[in-house]
Image (cartoon, rainbow, N blue to C red):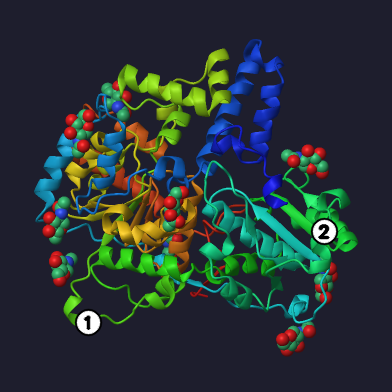
Amino acid sequence: MPEAASPPPLLPPPASASSPAASVLRTRRRRRAWRRPRGLLCWGALVAFFFLMNWWMFSRLQDPATRPRFRLRRHPPRATNSSLSTLEEVNATEKGKRPHPVMLTHLLALAAHALAEADNRPEPKDLWKEPINATLWKPCSDQRDWKASGNISSSEETNGYIIISANGGINQQRVAICNAVTISRLLNATLVIPKFLYSNVWLDKSQFRDIYQEDYFIKYLKPDIRIVKELPLELQSLDLEAIGSLVNDTDVMKEAKPSIYVKKILPILLKNRVVHFVGFGNRLSFDPIPFQLQRLRCRCNFHALRFVHKIQETGALLVERLHGHMPHLSPLQDNLLGHFAGKSIPSGNRNESSKYLAVHLRFEIDMVAYSMCYFGGGKDEEEELEMYRQIHFPALTEIKRTTKLPSAAFLRSEGKCPLAPEEAALMLAAIGFKRRTSIYIAGAEIYGGRHRMAAISRLYPAIVTKETLLSPSELEPFRNFSSQLAALDFIACASADAFAMTDPGSQFSSLVQGYRMYYGGGDLPTLRPNKRRLASILVKNVTIEWKEFETRVNKLIQQTKQVHERPIARSIFRHPRCPECMCRTDN
Ligand SMILES: *[C@@H]1O[C@H](CO)[C@@H](O)[C@H](O)[C@H]1NC(C)=O
Ligand SMILES: *[C@@H]1O[C@H](CO)[C@@H](O)[C@H](O)[C@H]1NC(C)=O
Ligand SMILES: *[C@@H]1O[C@H](CO)[C@@H](O)[C@H](O)[C@H]1NC(C)=O
Ligand SMILES: *[C@@H]1O[C@H](CO)[C@@H](O)[C@H](O)[C@H]1NC(C)=O
Ligand SMILES: *[C@@H]1O[C@H](CO)[C@@H](O)[C@H](O)[C@H]1NC(C)=O
Ligand SMILES: *[C@@H]1O[C@H](CO)[C@@H](O)[C@H](O)[C@H]1NC(C)=O
Ligand SMILES: *[C@@H]1O[C@H](CO)[C@@H](O)[C@H](O)[C@H]1NC(C)=O
Ligand SMILES: *[C@@H]1O[C@H](CO)[C@@H](O)[C@H](O)[C@H]1NC(C)=O
Ligand SMILES: *[C@@H]1O[C@H](CO)[C@@H](O)[C@H](O)[C@H]1NC(C)=O
């Protein structure tokens, strides 16, 4: 039933996800009226819509590792320690095309020079550090206090069963799972182990038990809610659609308040004893929500979900190879890798620990095309991206054809463009990362392939990916499973000594950032450049001196490093520094 209920993806990922924006899109496509917009008002509305889509796309577009179309290769990666092996494959698929030009060549030359000079100088003091105030926050969502609201799970009583079919990739699913846990508690319902919708865009059949330890999940949350693996037999034969137990996105709005669930869903639950949320995702508000429920949601995300042994074991291998030693047992490693962390290894193999930086370079062709930005590739690039848009984002092509949209230069100046590899490299060089820094790139199929990556790998030769760190046979069990590959990227990025986001919005980066805040003890910094301000610096690329560039970029990074409490209504998965999830120790 759940699978059948998922709509076939007519549009590519962003639009095929059954989200309100997608339905807006569909409705708009159906309505022909907006084809000939008249007057400024219409233009304004369309531009606003475009920005909305743009924002939505950055936050919802699948993370690279969950996009098998660009990720799964026909040929297995070669067993090579060349940091560019994956990029060579990209090159192979781009035969006959001219190489993509790289932007900012002048600044890149300055950066190369500066990096060579800085080799013997000490690193900036706080390069791998968070501000001191970060250490004041300690994880505490594992503490339960249900006394005030009474015990429910201890009793066998239940108002009914909640089933969810989560859409999206692994990161959206994770959010959906924890929302479902919270709603189950709210409604005194029993949760059936969440199902993941199969989409022929993401092509991953993985279900909950293929990614997370099912028994651990059930046991860990036992004091909070009752979780069962299957619906009771007598309920399995019900036609949920006919009795009105099927709930989709139209019925429950995005980020709905808990009261909506009590008002709309509880009566169905009490009447039919079962409710199935189809295409469930980001359906529960972050504020207002009772303290203990919010804490439960955090507990689910940071404590109850553990990767299966297969993922943990290979994740541990990755981290071991990145650090040059086995990850030691810390709360973070315990949660990520379980008993595969800290396994004693012969001391002969142990060597100096080395630090590494992880970068989530969200610069695949889908992101590049959707952004409508220009990346210095001339006519070739424009034609290629336009072609891609026509095939994959027809609605966008339509808007573009009928409306005057903001120019690429305007979008760039507004910070709406994903960072190209060369821009990311310049930022890292300005911050003070040495040339020999090991850099782990999550999601490696960069638009422009080898040539584009050459810019960054000339500055930073020690670039690695999971494909270069793992042998083909180690990678083989994951090959057909984009979500599981994404889990490996998650482990490598969460364990990194520093993590740089080049895409302020994606769910992957958000979850990694939150995870690092929660478990990092103030030691796992995340760099989040303000892209608008970065753009205002980069636009001076031809005239700016390296020293000034360095100073300005550092100022910008310092500002984003500040430690503050979660702003209201922001995601607790991304900003766990709030009393429900973490406790301040200074008062
Ligand atoms: C990879 O490393 C091994 C041992 O360090 C070396 O023998 C081999 O030639 C390297 N392969 C490539 C393609 O560089
Ligand atoms: C990449 O492609 C170019 C042009 O097609 C070719 O000359 C070059 O040898 C390729 N590089 C690799 C590593 O395959
Ligand atoms: C850090 O904490 C100190 C006192 O604990 C406070 O004065 C200071 O404003 C805090 N800084 C930030 C950036 O929160
Ligand atoms: C909740 O359960 C615990 C033990 O599981 C018990 O000690 C406590 O008294 C119960 N509280 C209420 C309000 O029933
Ligand atoms: C859930 O159970 C608690 C304790 O028995 C009760 O106070 C609360 O009203 C119940 N909520 C619902 C929605 O049934
Ligand atoms: C959602 O359910 C409503 C009825 O509850 C139905 O009219 C609507 O078509 C459904 N939407 C989708 C996308 O399935
Ligand atoms: C770790 O040890 C291996 C051999 O035991 C050596 O080749 C490698 O360079 C060492 N790595 C570091 C980071 O020291
Ligand atoms: C992946 O899929 C291919 C073809 O669909 C199949 O031959 C192969 O055995 C699969 N590999 C794994 C590890 O499931
Ligand atoms: C680099 O500088 C030139 C000239 O000022 C400008 O036109 C271009 O947009 C800049 N490039 C970037 C990526 O900002």
The answer to whether residue 579 of the structure is visible from this angle is no
Q: Position of residue 54 (x, y in %)?
A: 53, 33
What SS does tag 1 mark? loop
Mark 1 nearby-residue class (10 Å; few <14, some 14–19, many ≥20): few
Q: Is mark 1 within 8 Å of ligand 7?
A: no
Q: Position of residue 509 (x, y in %)?
A: 45, 51
| Residue highlighted by disc 2 | 262
**Vertical relation: 413 (above or below) 152:** above
Q: Is mark 2 within 8 Å of ligand 5?
A: yes
Q: Image quadrant of residue 11?
A: top right
The residue located at (35%, 69%) in the rendering is 316
246 vs 220, nearest the viewer: 246
The amino acid sitting under disc 2 is Val
The numbered mark at residue 346 is 1
The answer to whether residue 553 of the structure is visible from this angle is yes
Residue 125 falls left or right of residue 393: left
What SS does tag 2 mark? helix
Ligand 1 image-quadrant field: bottom left
The amino acid sitting under disc 1 is Pro
Q: Point out the frontmost of discs 2 and 1.
A: 1
The numbered mark at residue 418 is none
The residue located at (47%, 53%) in the rendering is 481
Q: Image quadrant of residue 100?
A: top left
